[in-house]
Amino acid sequence: MEQAITLTRHILEGQKAHPGATGEFSALLTQIALAGKRISFELSRAGLLGKTGLTGGTNIHGEAVKELDQISNDIFVDCFEYLDLVSMVVSEEMDTAASLKGKSKTGKYSLYIDPMDGSSNIEINESLGSIFSIQKNTNGAETEKDLLHKGSDQLTAGYLMYGPCTMLVIAYNNQVHGFTLDMGLGEFILTHPNIRIPSRGKIISLNAGNASKWDKGLQNYLKYTQEQTEKEKLFSYRYSGTFVSDFHRILLKGGTFLYPGEVKKPEGKLRLLYEVAPLGFVCEAAGGKASTGKERVLDIQPTEIHQHVPVIIGSAENVDEILTYLSH
Ligand code: AHG
Ligand code: MN
Ligand code: MN
């Protein structure tokens, strides 16, 4: 049997192909993978140990923090604290950016995380995720203002998905690769090399319960998809409530995920720096598109670290079609 390509081997071979490589990128990915393995392990026991509840605290978005939100956040920080490459961490679960300075000698990179995505699904044993993004600090990063980089500047971004098996999907150098965790070996194995999103797909992923609050154009699009489905089964609706899992389905099968703004809340729910921009980066690297409805996600100049943005993301033809429905 051909030898499996582990994440480590994949990284080392990539490094060999770039003679000037410093090994820093490899070190960063190794820590992401370690965080993923540790979180996956915690999730596998959380139900047994009664760790699926709330901490009693509230995050900056006004959401009740779950124990696993906190545990996952602490695991990511811990994995990067002893690596002297990351100076600042922005997280959904930390009101302000955490400085790892002092511990970081070079401070060359900043990390952005949604440590536990889909946390409302924790107690029902539904698929969950973690989202990450890494930016290079051109002039060092001292303050939160220094962390407001466009999505197009991301060095790498991706996600961990904790489903029936744990997967790591990474985008860099305009390519997307998927790895599956072999629990026996404790290694991520390359199972989905060079993922390309279909140019069109049937799946629509959205919370239709919010439709009455959307822009009329988008309501018309929803009506169109329902009519088309009655006639020719052109569309199929799927929504889990975990952005990572819903996006992963779209990435592999094609279609669109939408979390639009509402007329009274135009900024939508999802967060730019650690949810929408990283998955936008993955989507584009796989040949898809990500838009707010008004502009390309990766072109947005962030104004604050916890900023929210609306998102329409997925197969290029589907996203383009939706944009023609929106009122401008
Ligand atoms: P998080 O658990 O990190 O707060 O993210 C939840 C997000 C996202 O994963 C999902 O797509 C969306 O919230 C679901 O929101 P609704 O329940 O409003 O549909
Ligand atoms: Mn999330
Ligand atoms: Mn989260």
Image: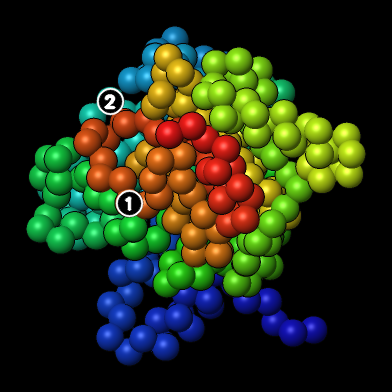
* Badge nearest the viewer, 1 or 2: 1
Kind of residue at disc 2? Asp
Q: Is residue 107 something that shows in the picture?
A: yes
Label 1: which residue? 299
- Which residue: 41% across, 24% down? 266
> Disc 2 marks which residue?
95
Residue type (three-letter) at the residue carrying disc 1: Asp
136 left or right, relative to 172: left
Q: Is residue 163 above or below residue 139?
A: above
Q: Earlier in the sequence, mark 1 or mark 2?
A: 2
**Image quadrant for the C terminus?**
top left
Quadrant holding the N terminus: bottom right
17 to 130, vertically: above or below: below
In percent of the image, x 65 and y 41: which residue is there?
246
**Which numbered circle lies on residue 197?**
none
Residue 160 shows in this picture: no
Can you give x and y, in whole percent of width and height, for residue 92 in the image? 38, 31
CB atoms of marks 1 and 2 within 8 Å: no
